[in-house]
Amino acid sequence: MRAVETAADTVEGRVLPHDLEAERAVLGAILLHPEHWPIVASILTPQDFFRDAHRRIYGAMARLIDAGRPIDFVMLRAELLRTGEFDEIGGPAYLAALIDGIPRATNLSHYAALVREAARLRHLISVATGALSEAYAAEQSAATIADATIRRLDRATMNSEARPVSARAAVDEYAVALDSTSLLPTGFVDLDTLLGGLALGELTIIASRPSMGKTSLGLGIADHLAGLTHPTAVFSLETPRRRVGARLLAWRADVPTIALERGTATVDEWGRVPAAQAALDGLPLYLDDGARTLTEIGAWCRRLRQEHQTLSCAVVDYLQLLIPEGHQASREQEIAAISRGLKRLAQDLGLSVVALSQLSRASEARRDKRPHLSDLRESGCLEQDADLAILLHRPEMYGRKPENVGLAEVIVAKNKGGPTGIVRLYFEARLAQFRNLAQETIG
């Protein structure tokens, strides 16, 4: 930034970044070439100007445009007199000086960009200063302050020069996204055929009544993704990570955890354990059982993304166990806030968030016991916020019959990007593991 002319705005004795020459160039060029106003208006707002007089002048220009009046010296003077700001900006001498020695109008967007960049730097300083004040006040947890600050920094550094584009340009952007973005496979063939996979930046809800296997399904998807070298995090709020690890070991060794824990495993089964442990070496699957709030989950996701350059998926088991942050009037509002937070996490970090959820008892009153989307417990916002909603149903839990032993229905009840339907999987009860139905025999 150029040399300062005033120390009106400072932080700890240091003048905030600004470029007064660029500000004057922008205002003078608009006065001489008002037809170029749309170029500047798509980049700058009055708050982007450092000098108060410049903010007032630019604001007056915007009001003239909004009122359908031209921008020229006479109209601008009248508008500033009307609002009592004419003397505040330096009077006629200052307005006249704006057009002295200004650069060509062809450079207008360049000077507007300089003004905008200085404003963004000031915004960054404001965010950082606010974080310091919040930390000293110690009224919130460190994790809460850090998470909020990161989100503010992300907004401060966002490209604000986005503008309307042609329909063809939007289609081209979509085509590029198709080439550069792949869906994440769940590992279940029929489900992937229906869905295509899980999309980055989206929220998936997997919901069921207790003991239907939603933890197994979520963990199975996470394990499959990690096996394809997609870094994945599992936040287990209900089950200690040691127990989650035991399930992963049992799947690979094909030995029930109860046999290992009770010492009833055969010699052959014990012999498969070391190889199963070795199979987990280098697997980009990370387990956490300590996070209890959205802020903590968000902080760990950002840290994992930083350490491993990317994070593809986060599984939260399960969302009703998250501790709400801030006061909410009802449990429904608490769940709604959690749901919005999970959606924002997926969008902000560009990862697929899979949140497990409880269903209400409503399905148990139905003859077929099959869950509906309206059964999502405690908040309709779960249905609203989810890009993909999957309901899990195992008929054998309501009456074991030869034809339904091991049968599981994965009901895709909502799919913002495609079709809905029912996919059938096989549930291996002794390992608590879902498998592709084609590999197994029912009954």
Image (tube, rainbow, N blue to C red):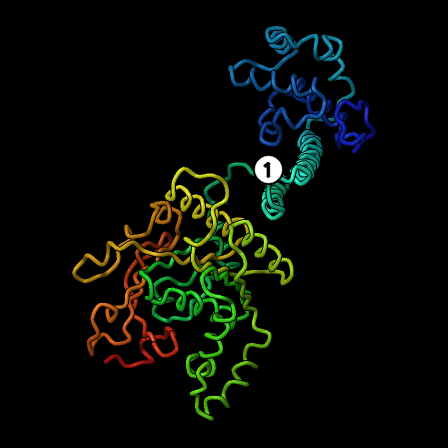
- Residue 229's x, y, as percent? 55, 70
Report the quarter where the C terminus lies.
Answer: bottom left
Instruction: Please name whichever residue, 421 or 63, is drawn nearer the observer in this view of the structure.
Output: 421
- Residue 60's x, y, as percent? 61, 16
In the image, is 374 to the left or to the right of 291?
Answer: left
In the rendered image, which quarter is residue 3 located in?
top right
Residue furthest to the front in view is: 262
- Residue 24's x, y, as percent? 73, 22
Residue 159 in view (yes/no): no
Q: Residue at x 55, y 52 (%)?
A: 298
Q: Is residue 201 above or below residue 250?
A: above
Q: Amino acid at mark 1?
A: Ser
Label 1 sits on a secondary structure element that is loop
* Residue at image mark 1: 160
In the image, is 316 to the left or to the right of 432?
Answer: right
Q: Is residue 128 above or below residue 7?
A: below
Instruction: Please name whichever residue, 136 or 435, is drawn nearer the observer in this view of the structure.
Output: 136
Instruction: Please name whichever residue, 216 or 354, is drawn nearer the observer in this view of the structure.
Output: 216
Residue furthest to the left in view is: 367
